Image (spheres, coloured by chain):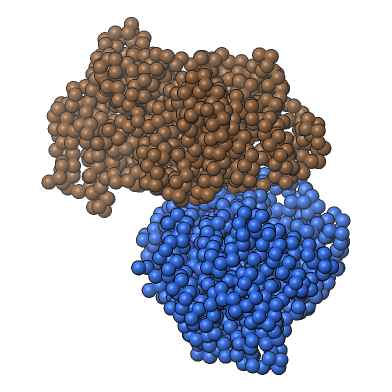
Chain colours: A brown, B blue
Amino acid sequence: MKKYVFSFEEGSKDMKELLGGKGAGLAEMTRIGLPVPPGITITTEACKEYYEKGQKLWPELKEQVLEKFEELQKKIGLRFGDKENPLLVSVRSGAAVSMPGMMDTILNLGLNDETVFGLAKNSNNERFAYDSYRRFIQMFGNVVLSIDHSKFEKILEEIKQTKGYEQDVELTAEDLKEVVKRYKELIKAETGKEFPQEPMEQLWLAVEAVFKSWNNERAIEYRRIKNIKGLLGTAVNIQAMVFGNLGDDCGTGVCFTRNPATGENELFGEYLPNAQGEDVVAGIRTPLPISELKNKFPELYEQLLDIKKKLENHYKDMQDIEFTVQKGKLYLLQTRTGQRTGFAAVKIAVDLVNEGIIDKKTALMRIEPESLNQLLHKRIDPVAKEKHKPIARGLPASPGAAVGKVVLNSKEAFELAEKKEKVILVRTETSPEDIKGMNAAQGILTQRGGMTSHAAVVARGMGKCAVVGCSDLIVDEDNGIIKVKDLTIKPGDWITLDGNTGEVYLGQLPLVEPDLSGNFETVMSWAKEVKTLGVRTNADTPKDAQVARNFGAEGIGLCRTEHMFFEGDRITAVREMILAGTKEEREKALNKILPMQKEDFYKLFKVMDGLPVTIRLLDPPLHEFLPKEDEEINSVARELGVSPEVIKEKVQNLMEVNPMLGHRGCRLLLTYPEITEMQTKAIMLAAVEAVKEGIKVEPQIMVPLVGHYEELKRVREVIERVAQKILEENNVDIKYKVGTMIEVPRAALTSDEIANYADFFSFGTNDLTQMTFGFSRDDIGKFLPTYLKEEILEDDPFKTVDIKGVGKLMKFTLENGKAVNPNLSVGICGEQGGEPRTVDFCREIKLDYVSCSPYRVPIAILAAAQAEIRRENKN
Amino acid sequence: MKKYVFSFEEGSKDMKELLGGKGAGLAEMTRIGLPVPPGITITTEACKEYYEKGQKLWPELKEQVLEKFEELQKKIGLRFGDKENPLLVSVRSGAAVSMPGMMDTILNLGLNDETVFGLAKNSNNERFAYDSYRRFIQMFGNVVLSIDHSKFEKILEEIKQTKGYEQDVELTAEDLKEVVKRYKELIKAETGKEFPQEPMEQLWLAVEAVFKSWNNERAIEYRRIKNIKGLLGTAVNIQAMVFGNLGDDCGTGVCFTRNPATGENELFGEYLPNAQGEDVVAGIRTPLPISELKNKFPELYEQLLDIKKKLENHYKDMQDIEFTVQKGKLYLLQTRTGQRTGFAAVKIAVDLVNEGIIDKKTALMRIEPESLNQLLHKRIDPVAKEKHKPIARGLPASPGAAVGKVVLNSKEAFELAEKKEKVILVRTETSPEDIKGMNAAQGILTQRGGMTSHAAVVARGMGKCAVVGCSDLIVDEDNGIIKVKDLTIKPGDWITLDGNTGEVYLGQLPLVEPDLSGNFETVMSWAKEVKTLGVRTNADTPKDAQVARNFGAEGIGLCRTEHMFFEGDRITAVREMILAGTKEEREKALNKILPMQKEDFYKLFKVMDGLPVTIRLLDPPLHEFLPKEDEEINSVARELGVSPEVIKEKVQNLMEVNPMLGHRGCRLLLTYPEITEMQTKAIMLAAVEAVKEGIKVEPQIMVPLVGHYEELKRVREVIERVAQKILEENNVDIKYKVGTMIEVPRAALTSDEIANYADFFSFGTNDLTQMTFGFSRDDIGKFLPTYLKEEILEDDPFKTVDIKGVGKLMKFTLENGKAVNPNLSVGICGEQGGEPRTVDFCREIKLDYVSCSPYRVPIAILAAAQAEIRRENKN
């Protein structure tokens, strides 16, 4: 016959599927000799059969439960329903995967009008006994008999009011007897039946209630959403009760085996003497910090230290435990791996390796890559933060923290920053024209825009704190003020941004600097040893490049040359170029930009000495470089010595209905080959200069937006012609590569043709995602939130690569491209390149490298190491 | 030994690859006994070996040429270089594929200072002999010796000036001797050598010149562009000269064996007595129409009729011939299949079947599907057209012709049309708000926009003549006038449009009505018998649907419901719906639209009785329905009783950066399910009403812009819920289908998932092309013309499906979709659906049907038949 019931002694942590997570945990702790109140677990298989058998408990099952329950009673020496000294139990559900929505807990099961006397006598505490009884009836009535919780609360309130009590503790034993009486009347009235007095009947009903909760609406919905399939059902855990509220030698607590905030190797948690778990939650009494137990309850403290050691040695990780002390004896009710901050994760991982408990690879798997973000940036001093309330909350677009004076326009931000003032740039939304001001500001705050808006993307690229889409804010640019509800903020007022949470504070909060030495460095060095996937950076400035290189970037995977077009005075030359009527005029303007771009590239080569530098030729449509507002148009017109109408007309002419799908990328390079020529010249002249100084350069010239091999072929011809000429003139031999972004679906579909003309591919997954989904990143605000909320999409495809759609194109490209051109190197430089799940996918399809913004480099490195270890573990 | 040289008698039409097209044609005519001046052909293989042997003629080749040439001389009874009666030959190149750029023709080869006497004596015409000689030297000097043509012309001009002549014919024999002398001096000066007097040397040099021309720049470029590969080289044809300029019993002519404009079974062409081909081209004398030969040269006419019969019986098609008459004897110099109009193509095909010359399938293959356009629409009377000059020229966006008074706005167009006035709507460009006016107008003329602009697409859909992107025009809407260069056109002025050519005429030109009975009907019935691919129509109105059904459409493949939103007063309700703040308000507005939409659908079901009607739910972004201009905003505000600011704000809110990739299609249906509900209701209520009247309905509800199966699944749930309710309430059982457009690349990539929730797929190749290429149709004007001109792209992918990219997605979708859901029906409803190459591709990948605008239905039917026959012929 099938075994449906296991005592805790019979199970282990490897039997999760059969016993559920909770049951397996309790069994494991029992197995390794930790003090766990004894109990039994009814298997998930029994739950499955319960449904197959038409939702009825069947004889074999009942027999096995009774048999194991008999053993349990013998072991403890107490009996169910014993009027003198009754056994009481808790009943809890527990599937293989933690699942909110299922029935939680029934405590004190076994109490009835008679056993309550025994409990009173034995505990020598009548009030305790009746309080336990009324709690049991309430829980049972609610979860087993489906009577609304509030109906019980109402009775309790009425009695308290009659007596003039404020708090539950004021209720006497006699009051509680009255409560019990009225609770039972309620149950009779609601169900038409008496509250079941027979403990075994109570138990069977509770077991069925657990089984039934497996298929309640919330649980089904949760499984659907999380795509949880293939589970048998829920297990039922029946465990002997222990009480923390039987006197001063009793108590209850929760505790982490290490500090979950800092990772310090110390017990961390709270303890409430003479109390049950519920009381801690209720928050009426203040619990003691665990550290104080050392003096106040030294024995208990020793017991906990002992447990900590056993648990950590066994689970090989920091644990989060729940315990109850009954008459001086400590019982464990739960243990699980503890949640921790990024700081703690890194310290604990390194400490555990040093303590010989885990190896390096296990340590690497323990750190959530995204949590490194906390270590890489400034943050608001946690102590100060607790004392302040945010005035508004937006999207945490770029991590870190920033303090500065409010400035409402980029020009002013730049000017004040020049005077060493700290400023926060606040805008309705930002545009490429704001780059200079954004760069000068401590942080950026916008009223509109999402996680992938211009402000968000640029700020992340700069590693600069940003809060965007802060709709509590109204930026009144006309009057030069900001309104937040009733509050008015003026330029010059101090504010503080928390880029990790999206919170905005009034005033100057103290910041804490990041510390990247010590444990962080250690973890990074381990990760680099393990990973095989290359990690490069998306960087447009020598400063960013240096940051990334310090973090371990192995080259530049994407340098967006257009960002350089906005810097300093060169935007004037760029605009001249755009306004030019002839090729000659255009070339003249381009010649002004040439020396500046050359200098930019030279500096990048210098920082990246010995590593590849991938430079993307001009990508955005030309209208992005022209002014939009009247005032600015006038000022540009003066600067260029033309009439404002000329500029307005040009802006009008260049306007596009769908600029995303318009005249940009290689389309621009093909219609204006002189741009290709100028940029190639700048790159190769910079390379020549660098080489002459002994710098090792690896220029990789990248053509954007290719969708047809002819496009790449023709741009490549121009690049090679110009490059060859410069190398010959300078009598230098430099190996350079020419490749393309794969960002148009057609490029992926025809990658076998394009690979003939490319030395490398780089997935531009931002655009590739836009076109594959038909989602404009600038416009998804109108429907993507709904899609995510209603789980039409599981993830924002701009955050993590959509494996089924975009990923299919990537895999296809990789296979077809390399089949045609075995030397083809393939990377990714879209925003997702630094996101751990994407990094894992890139490793899966055997990409050569990922490239991401500088501050995501450590995250990508760790994720790459984890991807590697995951695959080693699979084999 | 390899055979390098063939006499005409030895070849045939099947030896094109070896003898070239011209050589094979001459051989074939010789073979079937037509009078062709004798000659020989040097093979393309010889050309190939010429290059392999380092560009030298080799002994074996020369031997074979000499041997065949000897035979030729014997056959004719004349000898090369004979001073008394010399043989003269022409030398012409000819590859397997007609190829401009290669050397053309050298005539009169064999003449020299001695044989010219023989020619003079024999022809009894000294002038003729020296004229022939000087022409030979000039051609030889130019094409063999590479001396610039103009240098010869200069000499000729000088002599004419000295003599005071105006025309060449005034040159006497003596003058021509002088020309010859100076030509020879020129050659000596340019090449350092004497003009070769030895006829065999002339011949060898000419043969080499032909071989060399195979690899000249223009020929190589032509082959690259046309992707012509695998040819060996060019053949060389050496043929005995005949002369049409030896007297009045001589002449030269070109002639079609049937009328190429009308298809009438009559000789059609021109004849010039006593002349050479060159003289016809020079246009100094007016040739006779062939029909006049009947009286003037009855014998010649009889000969031609005889030739016509022989040729047509042999080639089984109308031929285009060149001939020369020498001393009363007719010689054929070339025959090829004649170009013809659509009218002629249809008539000739039917006639040839009736005459028993070809079968029906061959006849169907003879008609260029696109040429049917000429038959389907009105056209300008060709006679009247010849007499007028167009004032401007735009893109021929929609075929046909239209005469009307100029109107500059849609409202007025509608009002005048109500008064039975004929109007032409002239706009800078059109928007959906113009639909009403476009519908009322005879034709549409726009200043901006391409072949896929709004005006073009809508006009084609309506089968209405349109000329777009007519940049000669300046529509000055402020002053209510149109300027065309110096000309000013005012509202009320008459103009005439030619939608087949894009020409615009001032005034009223007479039009000719199309005739769709007779031969056209016959061809259509044959095509329908043969084709297997289904042909449906894209139609939004009962009128369009009726036109399409008359043309043979087998259902509606796409009904765009949004077009109905603009009709009559319903746009007001639509705007109310958009401005609604709550779901309830929205539903209230939608309820106003419901009865109107229901009526629309009912009418479509009625017209399409017994055939499927595919209705696409709302697709465009809502902002398309709101007014844009201040004046209109004010008027709408008054109409709806809100302030203009409310509307302006809504317009602002709904504005999108890339509307193409924005909040539209199923994204709209999911965020506003009440739209889905209303449209489903309208469709099902209409179906119920129709069924109750005995109409057979097949409603197919199509969800646009799906990219993820969840989207379709959820919209489908709403549709089924609403539909089920209506069917139950009405106690009617109607089989309806729910499917989706495949227009987002991700839909194609995940078609195996989506197919689980779809009864049918329909490729929206317009959007699929936009997203696969990343081309916005509204913005390609800035780069696509350059791409096509420079052959970066071979075709406009919006005209014909891009097989390598978009086609790959289509094939993948079809295979994966049908694998998951074998009952899935798959069609195409993008604009390309009616384009013959696309139709062929759809047949290739085994699509179930194509759907296109009504006036393209016949074209698609013929193309589908051809696709079928092509595949039968392959097997």
Residue at (22% x, 45% y) in the render: A46
Residue nearer the viewer, A832 or A219:
A832
- Determine the image quadrant of residue A637: top right
Residue at (38% x, 74% y) in the render: B875
Q: Is residue B858 visible?
A: no
- Determine the image quadrant of residue A759: top left
Residue nearer the viewer, B531 or B502:
B502
Q: Position of residue A859 (x, y in %)?
A: 43, 27
Residue located farthest toward the top when viewing the structure as drawn: A295
User: In this picture, is A788 found above or below B382?
Assistant: above
Q: Is residue B166 left or right of B736 when viewed as pictured? A: right
The C terminus of chain A - image quarter: top left
User: In this picture, is B183 found above or below A464?
Assistant: below
Q: Position of residue A851 (x, y in %)?
A: 46, 32
Residue nearer the viewer, A399 or A323:
A399
Residue at (70% x, 26% y) in the render: A569
Q: Is residue A200 left or right of B597 when viewed as pictured? A: left
